[in-house]
Amino acid sequence: MNRVAVIDYGMGNLHSVAKAVEHVGDDLQLSVTSDEKIIMAADRVIFPGVGAMRDCMGEIIRLGIDDILRRFVETKPVLGVCVGMQALLEHSEENNGVDCIGLFAGNVIKFKEGMTNDSGETLKVPHMGWNKVRHSKSHPLWHDIPDNSRFYFVHSYYVKPGNANDVVGESTYPEYFTAALAKQNIFAVQFHPEKSQTVGLQLYKNFLTWDGGL
């Protein structure tokens, strides 16, 4: 039995994440929960998130999710998704500055207004839509996902990691930004796998069999 906990702190697109995981999982026990005992008993954790960072971190701290994640990731795999990825950094400049969980070095910063593409067209913020993701490094979660596959993004802020070695995926808007981070038992993505069709489902499938190693 593969026990998977999708962490519920009231700020995630939990239904679509859970449905995607159930679709690709075999012999799966899936829990959408904030219960410490259930999370710690799981084999792996998915940490999604949407919304404003101040509200997210407020609930994460209130529920003790930050401490639970720090203990869990010492021995078992964690997948961060969208704001769940951003919350794993040290600090976000959103909402006049918010301290985050700090499992990755670095900060979360906002896309600049007035950005333009190669044709001179103004790029909107939030960045919303399909973008190619380049594999900066090989990783088990990229298994059977071709390099430069398109994933679905919705975000106004992006991760600027403190350690370039943590970057395993990049995209552009219009400059390169970090689309995926990995370190030890953690893999985290800025895009939404559950909205990314075949390649997104493959990433969840890969996570369900990942032991946290390289």
Image: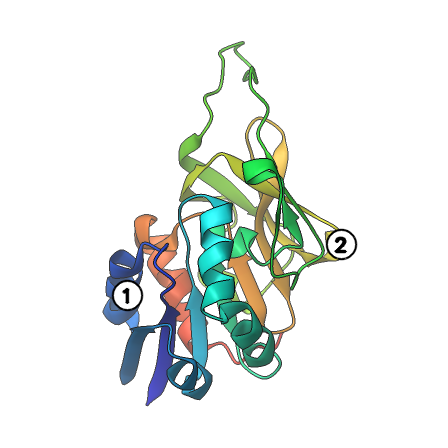
Which picture quadrant has residue 109?
top right
Q: Residue at x 45, y 43 (%)?
A: 52
Residue 33 in view in this figure: yes
> For this view, does 171 lie left or right of residue 40?
right
Callout 2 amino acid: Asn
Q: Nearer the viewer, residue 134 or 164?
A: 164
How many angstroms separate mark 1 from mark 2 (CA)? 31 Å
Q: Nearer the viewer, residue 104 or 123?
A: 104
How many marks are shown on the rendered structure? 2
> For this view, does 79 lie left or right of residue 75?
left
> For this view, does 30 lie left or right of residue 39?
left
Residue 83 sits above or below residue 61 on the image: above
Task: Classify the position of the C terminus by image quarter.
Answer: bottom right
Residue 26 in view in this figure: no
Callout 1 amino acid: Ala
Q: Which residue is mark 2?
A: 163
Which picture quadrant has residue 173?
top right
Q: Residue at x 49, y 34 (%)?
A: 156
Disc 1 residue crowd, few under 14, some 14–19, many 20+, Cα 10 Å: some
Q: Which residue is mark 1?
A: 18
Residue 147 sits above or below residue 125 on the image: below
Outermost residue, front side: 62
- Image location of residue 158, percent across then percent down: 57, 40
Q: Nearer the viewer, residue 186 or 113?
A: 113
Which picture quadrant has residue 13?
bottom left
